[in-house]
């Protein structure tokens, strides 16, 4: 049985990731002393991650991080594994952790579109893809929620206010837009020139 198949079978039945033993999670060779932080295995050169005393593979570390991000939506490791199994059956081969996260985020759009699209932007960054389309959808949902409230008619552009903010967003910070104008032109995030993707947003301008 291949390592990936063994890993998938192990993870599909467990409620935790990695191993608490002092062995490499890739090649199962003994490690002395047990790593306390990220390091390369001296036997197979695999990158070992450490989380709560457990030694994880790179894939397990990715899964652990995303399950933690999604736990507020009730997503557990077991549910992640179930979704991965479903997707693997659909693909006819083992689905990647990234594809599984995309599937889960798409199901969350109906519950909280703004946050789901924001998390999609984070995943796109990790895959070296442009986060802008997902940031635009997330921002759009926030603006629509303001409009739906019936209380807010204008919003103010808010900068992330650090040295990484692009010149366009710095210049836009503090400007007030009607919600309809912001929805029409979408200056946030489309005017952003940061390679990382826009981290700015809007705040409600009540009483203006």
Image (tube, rainbow, N blue to C red):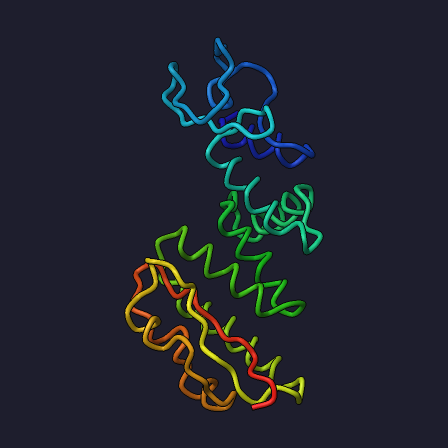
Residue at point 53%, 35% (across, down): 60
Asked whether 12 or 31 is in front, the reply is 31
How far across and down, in percent of the image, does residue 95 sit? Answer: 52, 46
How far across and down, in percent of the image, does residue 197 sit? Answer: 37, 63
Which part of the image, by quadrant, shows the C terminus?
Answer: bottom right
How far across and down, in percent of the image, does residue 50 sit? Answer: 52, 27
Asked whether 184 or 159 is in front, the reply is 159
Figure check: 119 above or below 149: above
Figure check: 198 above or below 76: below
Count of numbered circles on the image: 0
Residue at point 36%, 21% (across, down): 45
How far across and down, in percent of the image, does residue 151 sit? Answer: 65, 87
Q: Is residue 4 left or right of residue 14?
A: left
Asked whether 164 or 129 is in front, the reply is 164
Figure check: 128 above or below 26: below
Residue at point 52%, 87% (across, down): 179
Asked whether 195 or 126 is in front, the reply is 195
Figure check: 109 above or below 2: below
Residue at point 66%, 89% (across, down): 150
């Amino acid at each position: 049985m291949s390592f990936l198949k063994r890993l998938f079978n192990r993870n599909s039945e467990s409620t935790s990731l990695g191993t608490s033993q002092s062995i490499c999670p890739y090649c199962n060779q003994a490690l002395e002393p047990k790593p306390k932080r990220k390091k390369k295995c001296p036997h197979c050169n695999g990158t070992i991650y450490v989380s709560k005393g457990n030694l994880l593979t790179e894939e397990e570390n990715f899964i652990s991080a995303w399950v933690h991000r999604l736990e507020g939506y009730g997503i557990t490791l077991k549910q992640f594994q179930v979704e991965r199994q479903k997707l693997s059956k659909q693909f006819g081969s083992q689905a990647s952790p990234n594809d599984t996260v995309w599937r889960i985020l798409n199901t969350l759009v109906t519950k909280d579109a703004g946050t789901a699209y924001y998390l999609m932007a984070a995943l796109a960054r990790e895959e070296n893809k442009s986060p802008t389309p997902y940031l635009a959808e997330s921002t759009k949902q926030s603006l629509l929620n303001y409009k739906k409230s019936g209380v807010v008619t204008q919003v103010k552009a808010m900068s992330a206010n650090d040295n990484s903010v692009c010149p366009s967003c710095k210049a836009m910070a503090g400007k007030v837009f009607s919600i309809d104008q912001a929805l029409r032109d979408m200056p946030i995030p489309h005017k952003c020139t940061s390679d990382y993707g826009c981290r700015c947003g809007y705040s409600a301008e009540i009483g203006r």
